[in-house]
Image (cartoon, rainbow, N blue to C red):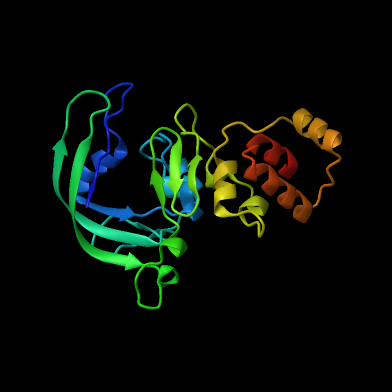
Amino acid sequence: MVFSPVRRSIDNTTKDTLNNVNSVKEVVINVVNYEIVQQMSLSSADYSCEINEFEKAGLTMIKSDIVKPFRVKESPVQFECKVLEVKALGDKGGAGNLVICEVLKIHVNEKILQKDNSIDPHKIDLVARAGGNFYSRVSAGYFEIAKPLSKLGMGFDKLPSKIKNSTILSGNDLGKLASLDVLPSETEIENFRKEHNIVQNEITSHTLAKQYLDKDEILNAWKVLL
């Protein structure tokens, strides 16, 4: 398998992914499906190296069987790999680095398999990068997620328990909420609730918040939830 972490265009520094690859010489490649795409996007924010991105993205660390790096439990397919070669494609900002890996072990969630044990493309519901803010979902075509470049989202670890443990909001919903860096003020919340006649109880507020999140109105979702 091959993937390519790039040098930062702004200051030509290398990202944690490449630094870790050069240090450990082992990786886990976790495929992304639609269920975790917002959390994946949140994990790509440029948090400092001492921040645990698993915690920020609300993803679960599980030990690998062979390699040192952890796997992502929520990913439907995980590849434990050793790094064979890192081939730099340049030394300027934006240059890629081909990380060439040998797969040592594959973990597959049985829920995505068909009766003959082959992977069902509809059940796995993979997501592919398509350039810029665009992604492609195997079952629904293109959609857009704003890159978390100019701000660092608060992360899952800062979400209140009543929101994080919601039975109504999905992982993608929580990922959107956790991508916000500044919450609305008490005045904004009060004015919004009065304007929309919002009754405050958990089921109603979480259901309404989900409707706003489906429209990517993240700030309004927070105004309902807080």
For residue 114, above or below residue 178: below
Total count of labels: 0
**x, y percent for residue 95:** 23, 29
Q: Is residue 99 left or right of residue 71?
A: left
Between 135 and 15, the residue placed more toward the observer is 135
Residue at 52%, 36% (x, y): give it: 153
Q: Quadrant of residue 62?
A: bottom left
Q: Quadrant of residue 183?
A: top right
**x, y percent for residue 188:** 76, 29
Q: Which quarter of the figure is the C terminus placed in?
A: top right
Between 175 and 62, the residue placed more toward the observer is 175
**x, y percent for residue 89:** 16, 32
For residue 15, above or below residue 60: above
Residue at 50%, 38% (x, y): give it: 145
Q: Is residue 122 left or right of residue 220?
A: left
Q: Is residue 9 left or right of residue 56?
A: left
For residue 84, above or below residue 111: above
Residue at 47%, 33% (x, y): give it: 148
**x, y percent for residue 158:** 57, 44
For residue 71, above or below residue 146: below
Between 97 and 65, the residue placed more toward the observer is 97
